[in-house]
Amino acid sequence: MTERTAGDPSGIDAPLADLRARIDAVDGELIELLQRRLALVSEVGEIKGRHGVPIYAPEREKAMIAAKRVMAQERGLSPDFIEDILRRCMREAYTHEKNMGFTRQAPDLGPVVVVGGRGRMGALFARMLTLSGYEVHVLEREDSPADAARMLAGAGLVVVSVPIKDTVRVVSELPTLPADALLVDLTSTKREVMAAMLAAHPGPVLGLHPMFGPDVDSLAKQVVAAVPGRDPEASRWLVEQIRLWGARVHEVSAEDHDAAMGLIQALRHFSTFAYGWHLSQEDHDLGELLTLSSPIYRLELVMVGRLFAQNPELYYDIITASPDALALIERYHGRYGEAIELLRQGDREGFVARFGQIGEWFGEHAGAFLAESRTLLAHADANR
Amino acid sequence: MTERTAGDPSGIDAPLADLRARIDAVDGELIELLQRRLALVSEVGEIKGRHGVPIYAPEREKAMIAAKRVMAQERGLSPDFIEDILRRCMREAYTHEKNMGFTRQAPDLGPVVVVGGRGRMGALFARMLTLSGYEVHVLEREDSPADAARMLAGAGLVVVSVPIKDTVRVVSELPTLPADALLVDLTSTKREVMAAMLAAHPGPVLGLHPMFGPDVDSLAKQVVAAVPGRDPEASRWLVEQIRLWGARVHEVSAEDHDAAMGLIQALRHFSTFAYGWHLSQEDHDLGELLTLSSPIYRLELVMVGRLFAQNPELYYDIITASPDALALIERYHGRYGEAIELLRQGDREGFVARFGQIGEWFGEHAGAFLAESRTLLAHADANR
């Protein structure tokens, strides 16, 4: 029978305290078990790293997860639950850089020169290359032409990482590089920059575009677009090196890259900018909007507001980098106006029909995206 | 020394196989430990449920997490890591409905009638109320007026959950309800519906707006907006009942509600519709856009495409529910056009200045949102 006391009329304090103590004991064991798992995975990573085997092996990962799901199911635990727990364990391992792939892919390469290596993306690449065992020098605008020439004289790899609007100029002002040096850029726009690099250097050329900000915890699962310029064989080692760091490298032509980035970046960021402007002008209390927002609606606001904690000049440059972006944005504005006409006419059927057409264009992605957003929010356990 | 074989020139197969076997053993123990934890938490939930104590106690949760973070830190495990693992454990507990708060808050209430209870949101409420011990009847449009009158004659709670465009009509066509019956709606728009309910029934009236779709796994951490109509004391039990189910209930006036929903819902959904239309008309291969998208860019596309897996009529009705939505949307269109002018003029300074003003309006939320999106994506471990 439950003991009832004056301060505990329902008599639940004692049984709850007992259960909580037992849960605390379980959590202590959990911590120990997680440490053991991390240590074992760390050993795996070290062995792989020493032998130049990539740390991140998606096929093996899938198979391991599938096996553990079966194990869980057999023992009456939700397979989704164990999968989520194991994925979090794997992520913990990834974020320890010593577990990342830093085997030097090009052991005989001359020094690396990162032009603009004090900018954040340049610094990230400089650090990753250094960790991978390369000799890395950083060239900044204040360095003298004499220093620049000296640094670049024996370079094996030259990475140009300067503001978008300066890239073509900096590339064309580079001194003569060694004939077999690999010239690479990290710019968000490619057609102009590729042309400049191919004109400035007769040797191997590769365009890269890291599709992430320099503040990522790790490169695991990030994406780098790669635009072949000249002599792709000579840049294969760098692509492998980036893959070893955990990123996915996707090859694309300069034209397709710029067209895609118009949609992925320019249109998206500009629309977010305009939306943020509109919200600020409508000036409804943001705190109240958030209080009335369930997780999905909060996420919609998060995706707008997050832009404004970032560098405006970077975004202006990204939006205006491609000459086609303005036309693309104007076409959106026009179509938005056409869509408003459906509302003005009260054309419910027209709206529904168009909605269906758009759904067909998204195809199976629409349903997959809905499920994905649901999963994402379910995992957003942080208390706010 | 590592044993080298013909098929394993690096000699790593055996050490790796050994480590993997040990990891498998740890995972087996992990599964068992997680089951023990779930069972203990389940017991806590049952005790609380039996005594009408809310399952979801944010303060206690925070304190528990803080204590475990310290425990982890002391033992050399990342506090963030253990927090994430524990939050996933807690979420697993929430999704088991038997652990949710289903104590009946209003034991003497007459039967509940859910009008439109076969629609998905109506069905969700019907199910939750049934699980909470109420006698629930469902009234659908095919039921005869005689059946409707009979069902509603002794009702303690009447929940109207019909399509937005039918709500005012259905409310005004209700037969006379018992004087003390509580009349409630679940509609996305409030001013008109509140007026209709207050006119149709002289007794207690409460407007609710669940800010989530009917397909949620659980109500934990979801939001319900509550608009007081008449006699708030008489509806307090229902607000407590919804809180017991795990949702956050936020009270707001009908005017503020509709203004907020114009921004949170109508503007947002319509803009997403227009954006989806634009993407489909530009017709760049979506698969390639996704391949070139790192997690944050993928999320941007997910937030657009997910709309089109849903019901177009529901969204048309949400967008057009409030008479002010069209004007709000047209103002956005106008401001978008003004923003384009900055690009046409190449007005970098103007863009940067405006960006800063918007950032000031978002205030500290901007930085918090940036961090939040980063955390969210870091947790998005699902392999794609």
Image (cartoon, coloured by chain):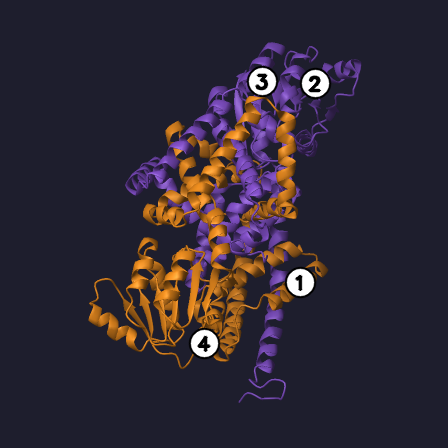
Chain colours: A orange, B purple
Q: Which residue is mark 4?
A: A103
Mark 2 residue type: Ala
- Name the residue tied to disc 3: B193
Q: Nearer the viewer, residue B261 or A204?
A: A204
| Discs 1 and 3 share one subunit | no
Q: Amino acid at mark 1?
A: Ala
Can residue B357 be seen by looking at this rendering?
A: yes
* Numbered circles on residues, count: 4
Alpha carbon distance from label 4 to label 3: 66 Å
Q: Label 3, secondary structure: give it.
A: helix
Of tags 2 and 4, which is closer to the observer?
4
Q: Amino acid at mark 4?
A: Thr
For mark 1, name the chain.
A
**What is the chain identity of the residue bearing mark 2?**
B
Q: Residue B84: horizontal and vertical position, in percent?
A: 50, 54
Which residue: 65% across, 27% down? Answer: A349
**Residue A66's disc number:** 1
SS for callout 2: loop
Q: Which residue is mark 2?
A: B155
Q: Residue A346 vs residue A170: left or right?
A: right
Viewport quadrant of the C terminus of chain B: bottom right
Specify few, some or many for label 2: CA neighbours under 10 Å numbering under 14, 14-19, or 20 or more: many
Q: Position of residue A169 (x, y in %)?
A: 30, 59
| Discs 2/3, front | 3
Camera-nearest residue between A153 and A192: A192
Same chain? Circles 2 and 4 = no
Q: How far apart are the two marked residues, 2 and 1, measured between alpha carbons?
A: 51 Å
**Residue A376 % position (x, y):** 55, 48
Considering the numbered disc 1 on the image, is that residue within a helix, a strand or a loop?
A: helix
